[in-house]
Image (spheres, grey):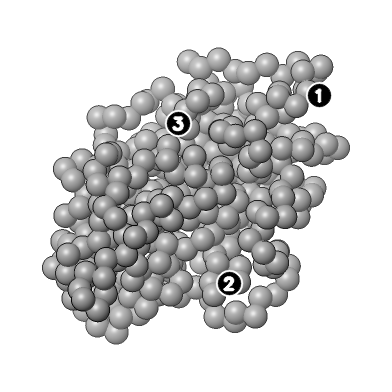
Amino acid sequence: MVESQSTSATAMENHDSQTNKQVQEIAADYNHLPERYIRKQDEQYGSLNNAGVSSPITQDIPVIDVSLLTSSLSELDKLKSAVSSWGCFQAINHGIEGSFLEKVREISELFFRFSGEEKKKYLRAEDNIEGYGNDMVLSEKQTLDWNDRLYLNVLPKHQRRLQFWPQNPSNFREVVDEYVSKIELINEFLLKALARSLNLEETSFLDQYGTSATMQARFNYYPPCPWPDKVFGVKAHADISILTFLLQDKEVEGLQVLKDGQWVGVPILPHALTISIGDQLEIMSNGIFKSPMHRVLINSKDARMSVALFCMPQTEKDIGPVDGLVTDETPRLYKNVTFTVDSFFNNYQKGRRAIDACKI
Ligand SMILES: O=C(O)CCC(=O)C(=O)O
Ligand SMILES: [Fe+2]
């Protein structure tokens, strides 16, 4: 078991212990927003709009019917166009029952509703992302996200560290295990469809996975914040995955994606999965597919939850643009690279994108 951190009354006043507290604990103290959570001007990516301000982009993020992708060329084309412009889409008819998605939401909600003491059994180590806790502190200047999370390495199975997998609720492990297997299948199906959409061999993207693909799960909990426009739930970033599968809160919005220089809210479709391209698929597709910048805003009334699964190649496996996409007319845009979760967080906390260093 991991030891919980000290939160004595006097220590609570000092800067460092505020950093150590979970966001849920800070949210319970409605009088004080610690400096470390207050966002800075340059983290807003220019003068982009915030919650409540209507955006001139009137379209919504595209909706793709996954069940049509093998039979309908127009749906496949719609998918290609969605990921080449928005970099993300809402997937419907993806094969996972709405009642099962409900279960995934439920185990996550139950976990975060437990007392701090119960949750801290799974507290992450100070220098490691895996486990329960708030933002990992990697730099003195870093603005902390208004977000507690449970972060688990869910694949490969033999590398699971079960000491971080909640025993309460009692079906937590079983539901996560089943969800991971279901997402693995959709991931494979979609990567084949995405390759076909570019007239490539079906396994062109899958071939780069290596023999032991990895997957990380991030259960996000965003407590309401009395100062919603002073914090970010998650600062603007792009994922380094190949694909990310996001199960949004059923009622509370907050996710925004950057489209043509504007932040656009992602609406809730209760049985949909919000799927986005990650940096590694942008690289493999030689820049045709876009890994979108996105961020999460907070509101003052309702807590929000989400569950993100990040599909990644085998650890330390290098990836690069697929051969068939590098031609005289479309020269190679990226070097071959190896991504790690650590490199992602190091860049993220410094306000950089890992993919920028991969450009030729
Ligand atoms: O909570 C969300 O909607 C998105 C979270 C996210 O972007 C992430 O965990 O990488
Ligand atoms: Fe993300």
Amino acid type for the residue under numbered disc 3: Glu
Q: Is residue 239 left or right of residue 294?
A: left
Residue 357 spot, x, y in % from top left:
41, 52
Residue under pointer 1? 13
| Quarter in which the C terminus is drawn | bottom left
Amino acid type for the residue under numbered disc 1: Glu
User: Is residue 103 something one can see in this rendering?
Assistant: no
From mark 1 to mark 2, how far is it between C-alphas?
A: 40 Å
Question: Looking at the image, which residue is at 43% across and 75% down?
Answer: 85
Alpha-carbon neighbours of circle 1 within 10 Å: few (<14), some, or many (≥20)?
few
Residue under pointer 2? 261
Q: Secondary structure at mark 1?
A: helix
From mark 3 to mark 1, how far is it between C-alphas?
A: 27 Å
State which quadrant residue 155 falls in.
Answer: top left
Q: Is residue 359 above or below residue 129?
A: below
Residue under pointer 3? 130
Residue 210 spot, x, y in % from top left:
18, 45
Alpha-carbon neighbours of circle 2 within 10 Å: few (<14), some, or many (≥20)?
few
Q: Earlier in the sequence, mark 3 or mark 1?
A: 1
Alpha-carbon neighbours of circle 3 within 10 Å: few (<14), some, or many (≥20)?
many
Q: Is residue 67 above or below residue 207?
A: below
